[in-house]
Image (tube, helix red, strand yellow):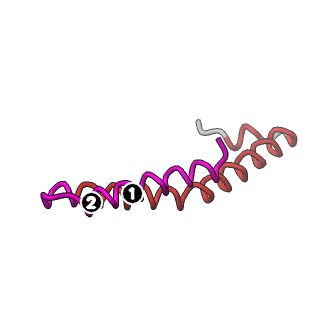
Amino acid sequence: MTDEQLAAMHRLIAEYHRNLAKEAMLDVVHQYHADLAQRLADEAAQIPRRTAILERLRVRIISAAGSGSLATMQSP
């Protein structure tokens, strides 16, 4: 699954929970679905950022391994 597909899935589920929140009769149920929708939307927005961070970390580890300074990147 690509990052774009994962983000799209999060957005779709967030929209589903927004619709459930609109249909909820009890305030607590409405609040639950609204909060869950917001968390899923926030997560969808973070996926590309996290992917970029992981890619930079991977490149850094590969370059450190090539230069022999991998020991300095590992925690004791």
Judge depth for marks 2 and 1 and give the one in front: 2
Q: Quadrant of residue 31?
A: bottom left
Per the image, label 2 sits on a secondary structure element best described as: helix
- Which of the two residues, 12 or 34, is positioned nearer the viewer here? 12
* Residue under the point 19% across and 54% down: 29
* Residue 18 quadrant: bottom left
* Name of the residue lying farthest toward the left: 26
Q: Which residue is mark 1?
A: 39
Q: Main secondary structure of the magenta part?
A: helix
For the N terminus, give its image quadrant: top right
Numbered disc 1: secondary structure = helix
| First in sequence: mark 2 vs mark 1 | 2
Q: Is residue 5 magenta?
A: yes
Q: Nearer the viewer, residue 41 or 30?
A: 30
Apparent side of residue 51 relative to residue 24 in the rendered image (left or right): right
**Type of the residue with mark 2:** Ala
Q: Which residue is mark 2?
A: 21
Residue sitting at 78 percent across and 48 percent down?
Answer: 59
Query: Magenta span covers which residues?
Result: 1-30
- The residue shown at (53%, 62%) is 45
- In the picture, measured across the screen, residue 23 lies left or right of residue 54, that is left
CA–CA distance in space, label 2 to label 1: 14 Å
